[in-house]
Image (tube, rainbow, N blue to C red):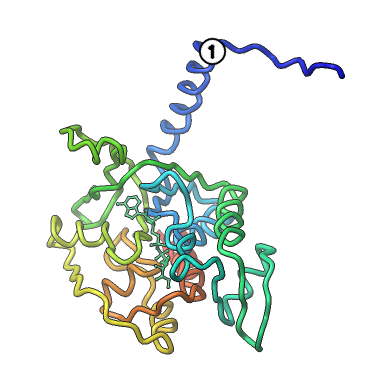
Amino acid sequence: MQSIRIKQVNEVKISKYILKYTFEDWNNLVESDVVIVGAGPSGMTAAYYLAKAGLKTVIFERRLSFGGGIGGGAMNFHKIVIETPADEIIKELKIRYIEPEEGIFIIDSAEFMAKLATAAIDAGAKIIHGVTVDDVIFRENPLRVAGVAVEWTSTQMSGLHVDPLFISAKAVVDATGHDAEIISVASRKVPELGIAVPGEKSAYSEIAEELVVENTGKVAPGLYATGMAVCEVKSLPRMGPIFGAMILSGKKVAEEIIKDLRNS
Ligand code: 48F
């Protein structure tokens, strides 16, 4: 059998290429159109539609993976429930499904997270892992959120005192899930924005799905909520392991930002 010839690359060359192209990306992303915080279902769906519309879009994700709550599913079971009209999105992304009754679609969690990430990346969005957003930038006249502060998750975990980097954005999307971390920090540190975060209610799935999508959108100039963060900010019930509203909310926030940025 013939042996496979593999190109020989030394350690210094590997390091240089990683550094050169990483910093090329970061220099570009430091002035983004849209920063999305969190690569869960709502954040990745939003990234897909925003990037598809030609906006420079980056997701900062604290963990070294994507999917947020998708992978854990319900009690770690690997099936996800989606309901009409969210099936339009899963069909657009060619996610395979079973339809046990009209309007209900069952999909695999691994395929769901992989294809959402692929769609966002193929549309032109960047997903940067291992980065935690811990604050916003704000501006006056007019008062608005104008970007975010980012730190390596590993630095945060170490408890070292290291200042963050700042990334400017025309729109910041809180897709951090149940804790609405970015909106919470903005409400606490920039009270002039007038944001209240009353917290989510207990489960009431039948009504929660519609309410999340209805209430998705801008919470202050430059700052938007999608996914479970909407429940936290608007005091809406949680819905448990059904994901239709998460991706419909991601699509809706993208449409609102596209409209707002076109009009600005
Ligand atoms: O929690 P998550 O999946 O948010 P979502 O898009 O979807 C919620 C559902 O998964 C589920 C549900 C559906 O019925 O109830 O919970 O609203 O994803 C949030 C992502 O944000 C990351 C976190 O690691 C996760 O991947 N994240 C949270 N805070 C930060 C962050 C932060 N400060 N900086 C960076 N990433």
- Which residue lies at the image location 31% right of the left edge and 45% below the top edge? 132
Residue 173, picture quadrant: bottom left
Q: Position of residue 102 (x, y in %)?
A: 66, 88
Q: Is residue 75 above or below residue 190?
A: below
Image quarter where the C terminus lies is: bottom left
Q: Is residue 248 left or right of residue 228?
A: right
Residue on which disc 1 sits: 13
Image quarter where the N terminus lies is: top right
Q: Amino acid at mark 1?
A: Lys
Q: Is residue 177 left or right of residue 13?
A: left
Q: Position of residue 257 (x, y in %)?
A: 43, 62
Q: Is residue 138 above or below residue 28?
A: below
Residue 213, picture quadrant: bottom left
- Which residue lies at the image location 33% right of the left edge and 41% below the top edge? 167
Question: Between residues 240 and 118, which one lies in front from this camera angle?
Answer: 240
Question: Between residues 184 and 104, which one lies in front from this camera angle?
Answer: 104
**SS at mark 1?**
helix
Q: Is residue 31 above or below residue 42?
A: above
Q: Is residue 206 left or right of residue 6?
A: left
Q: Quadrant of ligand 1?
A: bottom left
Q: Is residue 25 above or below residue 150?
A: above
